[in-house]
Image (tube, rainbow, N blue to C red):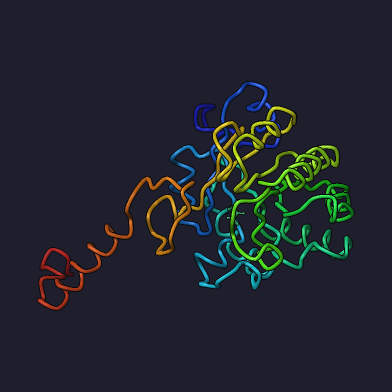
Amino acid sequence: MSDSNIVKKVTTQTFQQMKQNGEKISMITCYDYSTAKIFDAAGIDAILVGDSLGNVMMGYPTTLPVTVDNMITYAASVVRAVKRAFVVVDMPFGSYQGDPKLAVSNAVRIMKETGCQAVKIEGGQEIEESFKAILSAGIPIMGHLGLTPQSVNKFGGYGLRAKANEEAQTLFQNAQLLQDYGCFSVVLEKIPAHLATEVSKTLTIPTIGIGAGNACDGQVLVYQDMLGISDMVLPKFVRKYADLSSVIKNAVSNYVSDVKSGAFPSAEESY
Ligand code: KIV
């Protein structure tokens, strides 16, 4: 194989270099082999196998029912497809809160059984022991602060977080703590842009924003939202880059017509 065929994999070091060089990090969610191949070929820097798969792939109203086994099945499919992008996998609700020993064994399972490069967990100081236990096993962690969907029942919905001073201060402190624990990056979800700017300027690790303004060191979107596949009402931070729902509906409806009329398959499409 010639050197030009060797694809340089994105790593946690690449994330750090990109922050230092002021190069923005592009991240998108993905949950399956075929789509991951396309995203990787399109040049995405990182793929998040998010527990949002509970909503967009499994049809649950929240991410709470998602299990470690669910995450492993979807994540392993993504990892098999990807050559360049960094792959990070969400630890689902109940798999890291509480018992740090359970947190490490779940994180180890995810790493071993999927081949991903890191895990993502939601929360701050309240789960300090789990952060430390997972990091001490040599597993890189991407933190997640702000709107953390696994806490939807505590928040009472999916509204903007850290609008009030006290919550903003707590978020700021938690972001610094995550960096001190040794996280390599942190997602900031649905918080005021000025707060995300302050956090991004203060931290030496990259921030990845979703509904957190454009001063973050990178951005992430759920792919069904940005490609127009989702039938949900989308928050204003989503930019729709395509309307795949119409494209797919149109194609399948043409196929239905062709099958019904006998126009498919043709002689050329037969043996
Ligand atoms: O699960 C997910 O897709 C996420 C992103 C929205 C950041 O956590």
Count of marks, rendered view: 0
Examine the image and state in which quarter residue 248 appears. Answer: bottom left
Furthest toward the bottom, the residue is 260
x and y, in percent, of residue 169 in the image: 77, 41
Q: Residue at x 39, y 59 (%)?
A: 229
Residue 100 against residue 81 in the figure, above or below: below
Q: Residue at x 73, y 43 (%)?
A: 165
Residue 201 against residue 193 in the figure, above or below: above
Q: Residue at x 61, y 23 (%)?
A: 22
Examine the image and state in which quarter residue 256 appears. Answer: bottom left
Q: Residue at x 59, y 33 (%)?
A: 8
x and y, in percent, of residue 77 in the image: 56, 59
x and y, in percent, of residue 271 in the image: 18, 70
Left or right: 175 in relation to 98: left
Front residue of 168/76: it is 168
Residue 217 against residue 211 in the figure, above or below: above
Answer with the quadrant where ligand 1 appears in the image: bottom right
x and y, in percent, of residue 207 in the image: 66, 37
Examine the image and state in which quarter residue 109 appears. Answer: bottom right
Left or right: 6 in relation to 147: left
